[in-house]
Amino acid sequence: MKAVLATFNRELRAYFFSPLAYVVLFFFLVINGFIFSMIATYLSDPRSPAGPPLGLFFGGTLFFWLILLFVAPVLTMRLISEELRSGSVEVLMTAPVTEGQVVAGKYLAAFTFYAFLWAPTLAYAGILAYNAKVDWGPVAAGYLGILGIGAMFLAVGVFASSLTKSQLVAAIVTFALLIFLFSFGLLENLSNSEPLKQTFGYLNMWDHMDEMAKGIVDSRRLVYYASASWFFLFLASRALADKKWR
Amino acid sequence: MIEAQNLTRRYGDFTAVHGISFSVGEGEIVGMLGPNGAGKTTAIRMITGFLPPTSGRVTVAGKDLFESPREARRQLGYLPENVALYNEMRVEEYLAYRARLEGLSRAEARDAIGDAIERCLLSDVRHQIIGTLSKGYRQRVGLATAILHRPSTLVLDEPTVGLDPKQIIAIRELIRDLGRERTLFLSTHILPEVELLCNRVMIIDQGRIVAEGTPEALRERSVGNPTLRLTLKGAPDAADTLASVPGVVAARPAHPSTADGVWIVEHATGTDPREDVFHAAVQRGWVLLEMARERTSLEDVFVRLTTQDRAPDAATEAVEAAEPAEASEKAEENEEAVS
């Protein structure tokens, strides 16, 4: 536990010491703010159909997914690749720690930073609550969905980072894997047979965010994200243990 | 204490280390010597538990590195060849992080960090960001990391590589100091370093241990005859006269021209022709400016042992090539640092 905490602390600090974090934070907030104001303008037009603004904000637009698909690789690419490139992995892995502890610490730091990225968007809910009545259930469910999907995306990123010394390669691999995972769910709309439709439906994150934003929490979805996260983190720790890359 | 039994490491078809076995006793300083590419770093990575051996086992202070890795690693401090640190951290911060990683309690960590900073002479830079440190200081931070958790055994891979002469002296002093109370295993390709620091030397070549013993014992294995070095004034050609002195095997000028009067005189082992050489010079009316016994160096032994299987020409080439190779290595390192 101590080793996990030590790694977590170091990685979280590393985020805040790197300019990258601030660049990500900046664009993340600019784009999200823009989307939110667009949604608010659209909904305040009397001709538009009525709907919960945050419902649209959480996964209702393609922007949401684009941001998520870019943020996860950028946040995770450095985590293990940099250790492999600089060689600091050597002193790290000769300390009395296990690969699992190192991976867990790094992953938790990425997840915390990810949650930190979303925290300012709570202000949007605050703005809405100031001007209108907000149903907090669906908002909470929406954030739960964001954290769930984020958890899985970041785990994929940590895994890709454990494969290569190059941060760029790690980011590209993460991005490709995420596109793959994401479009899997979209196949739901293209498949004709019922069992296939159901299978892909189970993996459809877009649908899931829509449901969550309406306040429907489906535990099967959460189990999917948790088990996928665990699976990718497990692969990452195996990859780190297997030092044939040297 | 380190014990390695039959360590073998293969990379695909290439065998980097062929079943080497050795032990480093408590309080000993053992140096591993070998040309570049001999398998030193691979061997070191296996005895620190970073690289799993293809076969064989390692115990550190009686704990098996692969069966009880945590206990064994706690006893081990390691300075890798390329000291990689987290550049965005401050020295003290980094040591605090390492202390937590080693599982030290808060109080233990405070003591340990203070101690390591003092021993490695880092107090001037304790609040400095690691990325701004010179190579010598980085090396010392690496050493501080290695000794932080007070391990009983230290493993250092090329601890002085890439340092300037002043830094080398400082690091060597530190190593000697650390070796007083710990088991120390270090690798190097710098021969004088081994003679200065180590109680025992292991020469490895092409993944095998080719010789082992104290520096003195190894020096005795030198095949060459002992030699004298003289400087004569007014002796245009002294070769024949010197060669006729009893005990002398051969005499040749140290440099192609005899103008500077420096001669190298080989004599049979067990003889001491110095007196006779002096008389011979006096007889001829030459002025003897200088006469000294040359110590046969480990270098001869090293070169002979590590080049046995190759053609003699290739061997000398390899020795001559060693220097530029090192330089280009350094250049590479610099490039990396820049990028």
Image: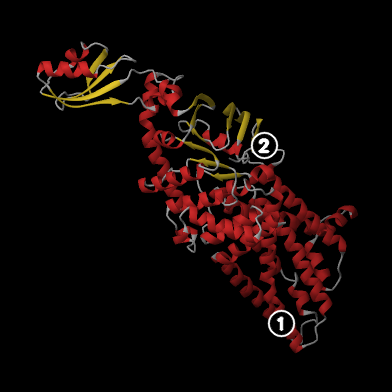
Which kind of residue does numbered mark 1 sit on? Ala
- Whole-Å distance between the Cαs marked 1 and 2? 69 Å
Q: Residue B124 in the image: state x and y as whole percent.
A: 44, 61
Chain of the residue under the numbered disc 2 shown in the image: B
Which residue lies most toward the front here? B275
How was this image coloured? secondary structure
Q: Residue B93 in the image: state x and y as whole percent.
A: 56, 61
Q: Which residue is mark 2?
A: B62
Q: Residue shown at 22%/13% (left/top)? A: B243
Which kind of residue does numbered mark 2 sit on? Gly
Q: Residues within 10 Å of mark 1 (few under 14, many from 20)?
A: some
- Image-quadrant location for residue B274: top left
Q: Foreground: A194 or A134?
A: A134
Q: Is residue B281 above or below residue B152?
A: above
Which residue lies most toward the right here? A194
SS category of the residue bearing label 1: helix
Q: Which residue is mark 1?
A: A40
Position of B171 compared to B263: left or right? right
Q: Residue shown at 86%/56% (left/top)? A: A197
The disc placed on residue B135 is none
